[in-house]
Amino acid sequence: MVKVKYEVENQIGTITIDSPPVNALEKQVLEELSEIVNKINEDVNVIIITGGGNKAFVAGADIKDFPNLTKETGVELVKKGQQIFQQIADLEQPVIAAIDGFTLGGGLELALACDFRIATSRSQFGLPEVKLGILPGYGGTQRLPRLIGSGKAKQLIFSGEFLSAEEAYKVGIIEEVTEESALNEARKWAEKISKRGPLAVRAAKKAVNEGLDQSLEEGLHTEATYFGTLCETEDKNEGVAAFFEKREPNFTRK
């Protein structure tokens, strides 16, 4: 049975992790997720990742894998997860996490690999790995401090405590809380982004991500370089022409 589904509509790709009851990141789920990410083509402008069912976005790794782990197999396990989540983070297209329900451990780490996150008010967030005598191994100790600062990240990682959606919003883990469907809200944002110049959006994502690892001076140079590259595209000419002609642009990714 397929546990990760992928569909494309209006140049928006939706990845749904559907592995009842809580969409745990078991081996099959990780493998199917990796296969889908590798197959995403240039025609897709935005990706949404969501969870199936009504309990969880993703409620963590598959704990059944843990009892027999050794040092070597433990490293192997987390490096595989890290690699797949990095594939998601490295996608050219913006990736939106549409969250409803428990988002714990590897589930939160998956959400952190996305570009931004929208959640329902009933969702809960946490990295409870220390309660099992381990630590977050799919990027949590690295991505969370970069997102919300080291102090708050350490408080959450060391305690393993959960946050409500409202609390997660206040500390900056998620960008929006909705009383309605997180998936529908994510689609609204995806539709907005999809109408923008796709080359420009992808270059902006690269500029932001690369700049985070650079000094301000280096980051400004990176920004200027991407700006200059976009100036030689047909999409730039089309966007400017559409502005003056008071019409919607017809971007062609050229």
Image (spheres, helix red, strand yellow):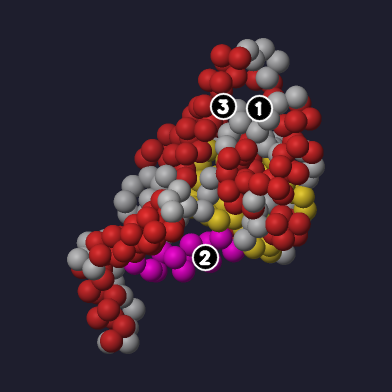
Q: Which element type, helix, strand or loop, lies under badge 2?
A: helix
The location of residue 218, given as percent across then percent down, is 37, 55
Q: Is residue 153 magenta?
A: no
Residue mark closest to the camera, 1 vs 3: 3
Sooner in the amino-acid sequence: mark 1 or mark 2 = 1
Q: Quadrant of residue 253?
A: bottom left
Q: Which element type, helix, strand or loop, lies under badge 1?
A: loop
Does the rendering let one see residue 38?
A: yes
Residue mark closest to the camera, 3 vs 2: 3
Residue indicated by mark 1: 62
Q: Nearer the viewer, residue 229 or 176?
A: 229
Please report the residue visible at 32 percent of the width from the left and 87 percent of the height from the top. Answer: 246
Q: Which element type, helix, strand or loop, lies under badge 3?
A: helix
Q: Which residues make up the magenta segment?
A: 185-197
Q: Few, some or many C-alpha atoms within 10 Å of disc 1 (few <14, some 14-19, many ≥20)?
A: some
**Amino acid type indicated by mark 2:** Trp
Residue indicated by mark 3: 78
Residue indicated by mark 2: 189
Sooner in the amino-acid sequence: mark 1 or mark 3 = 1
Please report the residue visible at 38 percent of the width from the left and 38 percent of the height from the top. Answer: 38
